[in-house]
Image: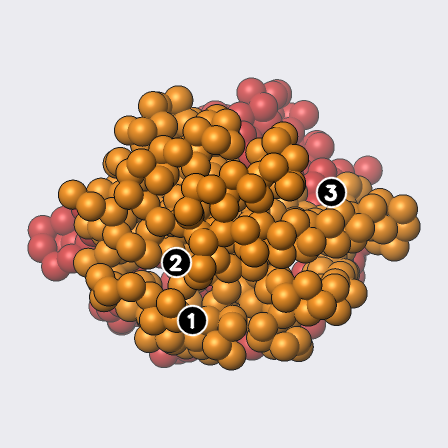
Chain colours: A red, B orange
Amino acid sequence: MSAHPRLSINQATIKHAPFDDALRVVRDAGIESIGLWREPVAEVGLVEAARRLEDSGLRMSTYCRAGFFTSPEGPERRASLDDNRRAIEETATLAAAGAPGSEAVLVLVAGGIPAGSTDLAGSRERVRDAIAELAPDAAAAGVTLAIEPLHPMYVSDRAVISMLGQALDIAEQFDPATVGVVVDTFHVWWDPQLFEQIARAGGHGGDGGRIATYQVCDWATPLPADVLLGRHYPGDGVIDFGAITRAVLATGYSADIEVEIFNQQIWDSLWTDVVERTSEAFSAAVGVHLDAAAPVRR
Amino acid sequence: MSAHPRLSINQATIKHAPFDDALRVVRDAGIESIGLWREPVAEVGLVEAARRLEDSGLRMSTYCRAGFFTSPEGPERRASLDDNRRAIEETATLAAAGAPGSEAVLVLVAGGIPAGSTDLAGSRERVRDAIAELAPDAAAAGVTLAIEPLHPMYVSDRAVISMLGQALDIAEQFDPATVGVVVDTFHVWWDPQLFEQIARAGGHGGDGGRIATYQVCDWATPLPADVLLGRHYPGDGVIDFGAITRAVLATGYSADIEVEIFNQQIWDSLWTDVVERTSEAFSAAVGVHLDAAAPVRR
């Protein structure tokens, strides 16, 4: 069975694979695209990582991740914003090195409530303010900042932005080529306003809409002891991928679709097995809802 | 330090205390009100439980819990609805036996997505349909059905109703004396629409509004291995009890305020210590925002 042409493997799905192995197992499985992470890129160095990505012939679908914007003004906030500026530059470098159709999309996680604080509203305002500060840098670099709403179980320690509507409230204050949103099924599948907010998001960032990347994995209970790792192959849980995928496509979204799974058991499996299983699961749960032809934009 | 006159201890906070012990430790701490659960009531029998509640001189603030409405039509759904009708009768009996100011409020948990299904929308519709079927029984018994939105981490296995706005969308289809909502800080503190939805809920069920009970406990991370048990004493986490409590009071809410904590460490502590600590935490985190005078309605 051949891989779906719009499937992208997010590198976190094979977290423990070194950079070269990650490129190799994805390419050897006939998959055309990969979502990269900063830590493994830093391990080989940015220039070298860009060279190897170019050699691989793969597209880069997203670069993960920066953000963490909730610190009040001070050295910690300045350091975080400087780090985000570096991430923007890295995104541009890697997207230029990837195969045609690569996306200069930087995924942003908002950050949790600062230690000792109960100021949720203030934390959310500081996310908006940070995006405003970074938007000119992103525009200059041709990078789209993609605000990712995370499941509400992460509000206190990881992301004060939980719902697609919140992410859009911020994104809409900026040029769509510069600030977009992430739709990750694991985080938003439960949202009672999901379909109206996907429709509001409209199209792909570069096309004037706001969905900068669409990511898929499944939700199942019971959750594991570490609730970060409760993600599953599409089809192994309760998410209706047909309904969500059709809604995302209806907005004109035409980029790659990433599978990003944090799951200890999957991380402990053979990378080639994981990629093969991901490809099969994607085709069965998501690919059937897509036009198998090449993405519109390529 | 004396207990706040509007504090009610939800029986689940001292889960392992037998019925008589629960009544005793609450009363001995100078607390005037208790939220009862069906299982311990069933252990002593309804009539006997009502007699003992009456002897205790305590008010009953809520009766927990019924619901689980997401099964498709069939014997399982019929059994669940029959069980809910019994719970309505139990609520009326116990509220009549409690001290003046007792509330005939039955807390309802929606239920999760049925096994093997991915039909979230259909599950939510079946919750609405079940409430419609039970409303005449509740009205006849003088009982308020209180729909409790649960945190979105429970959508798949416990409650397809996650947000206060969803609960109000259902409740507003019925008489406010018959169908209301629960505001439990643990479940809704993160909701970006919380304050607008509290304002929409308005007042106390019996007074024409929709907030049938206000429950408080705190959220902290990391979550424990069993995410049901990640609740904390008010003040030990990230929730802004001042802002939420003021918003609830502004609607005219005048009933008791329950502390309901599911936490293994607290369950393993001495009941008298737990009740004393709860009383102190409530006064410090919530009571300071209340008028210390007796509730308006009594």
State the separation of the CA atoms marked 2 and 1. 17 Å
Chain under disc 3: A
State the separation of the CA atoms marked 3 and 2. 45 Å
Amino acid type of the residue that numbered disc 1 sits on in the rendered structure: Ile
Tell me the tag on residue B256: 2
Tell me the tag on residue B198: 1
Q: Secondary structure at mark 1?
A: helix
- Point out the frontmost of discs 3 and 2: 2
Q: Left or right: B50 with respect to A276? A: left
Asked whether the residues under the numbered discs 2 and 1 touch, taking CB atoms below 8 Å apart as contact, a structural biologist would say: no
When the figure is inspected, residue A209 is found, relative to residue B34, above or below; the finding is below
Toward which corner of the image does residue B195 lie, by quadrant? Answer: bottom left
Amino acid type of the residue that numbered disc 3 sits on in the rendered structure: Gly
Asked whether the residues under the numbered discs 1 and 3 touch, taking CB atoms below 8 Å apart as contact, a structural biologist would say: no
When the figure is inspected, residue B78 is found, relative to residue B164, above or below; the finding is above
Chain under disc 1: B
